[in-house]
């Protein structure tokens, strides 16, 4: 999950069709989801430890380990002073989830807004532990803590850069999608906030494509629907 801005109030109207972005920019399909009530019997919660003033190096390390495969880079843009200031805000809650042996399995960060609406801003397991059911246990631990604060709702957003099963996973945890959109970002691997080698499943394109006749080749209609659209048929 990449948090940069909250959900925009305005809707962007775009005609259907492909859009090309400049090299170095990435488009990310975003889904906003919310839960209005606890889901009974979700899973046996992990043990959760609240970290109020994380050691910056350890926080960076865990954030990088969980998030770099999905292009999370916000912490790379924060100085140690920024991290300290961020966690000095009592509305910011950071928890590390542990199993019964004390092993560290993942992290959750949420923000309790002044209207008591809770946004889960970061949520993830260590990469070696995904696909084994620990996600539900981490979420059960997080939601136990969140619902205890009596929020109106708990919400989050997820992106197409995140794990492919994540919308189904959040739905299984009681979240319902309420809006979709997209986010354009500068590729962190080119910006220098993440190593070039992370997230190989997301294309890294740094040189503008300008093949000979590229534009005319791309615009030639290939399907009946495209030909009709070009002719202006309904
Ligand atoms: C996303 C993440 C938390 C999911 O946790 P996980 O333990 O790997 O999830 P699992 O694949 O074991 O699935 C957990 C549950 O969700 C359900 N689920 C997963 N994908 C699903 C889908 N597409 N449809 C329906 N249910 C689904 C599984 O069936 C399972 O439920 P069950 O235990 O009752 O069978 C974890 O993969 C992760 O941390 N990924 C990396 C970071 C990330 O993407 N974070 C999310 C940012 S928004």
Image (spheres, grey):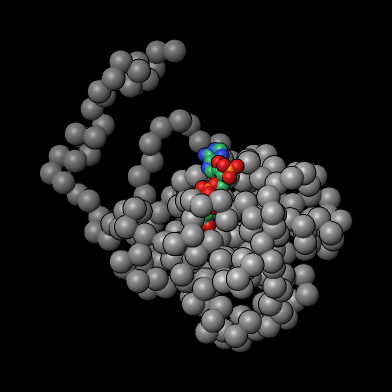
Extreme-top residue of the structure: 234
Asked whether, in this view, residue 104 is left or right of residue 16, the answer is right
Residue closest to the eye, 17 or 37: 37
Q: Nearer the viewer, residue 147 or 100?
A: 100
Residue at the image position 62 percent from the left and 66 percent from the top? 99
Dividing the picture into quarters, in which one does residue 216 lie?
A: top left
Residue 196 position within the rendered picture, expressed as x and y whole percent measured from the top left:
31, 68
Of residues 206 and 136, the one drawn nearer to the viewer in this rendering: 136
Instruction: Please state which of residues 165 and 231 is positioned toward the viewer in this rendering.
Output: 165
User: Is 17 situated above or below 6?
Assistant: above
User: Is any atom of residue 134 visible in this view?
Assistant: yes
Quick one: which residue is furthest to the front in this view?
Answer: 101
The residue most toward the left is: 212
Q: Quadrant of the C terminus?
A: top left
Q: Position of residue 145 (x, y in %)?
A: 77, 61
Q: Which residue does the image show at 84% across and 61% down from the upper left?
A: 149
In the rendered structure, the answer to whether residue 213 lies left or right of residue 81 reads left
Say which quadrant the N terminus sits in.
bottom right
The x and y percentages for residue 203 are: 31, 53
Q: x, y (%) of residue 192?
A: 37, 73
Q: Is residue 45 left or right of residue 123?
A: right
**Residue at 77% over, 70% down:** 91
Q: Which residue is at 13% across, 44% downward?
A: 212
Count of marks, rendered view: 0
Residue 182 in sight: no
């Amino acid at each position: 999950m990449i948090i940069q801005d909250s959900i925009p109030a305005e809707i962007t109207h775009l005609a259907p069709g492909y859009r090309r972005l400049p090299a170095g920019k990435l488009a990310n399909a975003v889904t906003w989801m919310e839960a209005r009530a606890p889901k009974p019997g979700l899973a046996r919660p992990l043990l959760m430890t609240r970290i109020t003033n994380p050691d910056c190096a350890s926080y960076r390390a865990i954030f990088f380990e969980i998030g770099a495969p999905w292009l999370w880079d916000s912490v790379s843009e924060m100085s140690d002073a920024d991290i300290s200031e961020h966690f000095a805000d009592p509305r910011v809650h950071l928890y590390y989830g542990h199993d019964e042996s004390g092993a560290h399995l993942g992290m959750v960060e949420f923000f309790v807004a002044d209207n008591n609406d809770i946004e889960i801003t970061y949520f993830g397991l260590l990469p070696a532990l995904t696909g084994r059911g620990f996600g539900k246990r981490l979420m059960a631990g997080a939601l136990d803590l969140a619902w205890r604060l009596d929020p109106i709702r708990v919400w989050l957003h997820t992106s197409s850069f995140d794990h492919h099963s994540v919308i189904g996973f959040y739905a299984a945890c009681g979240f319902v999608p309420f809006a979709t959109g997209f986010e354009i970002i500068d590729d962190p691997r080119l910006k220098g906030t993440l190593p070039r080698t992370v997230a190989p499943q997301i294309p890294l394109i740094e040189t503008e494509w300008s093949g000979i006749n590229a534009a005319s080749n791309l615009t030639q209609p290939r399907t009946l629907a495209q030909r009709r659209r070009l002719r202006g048929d309904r």
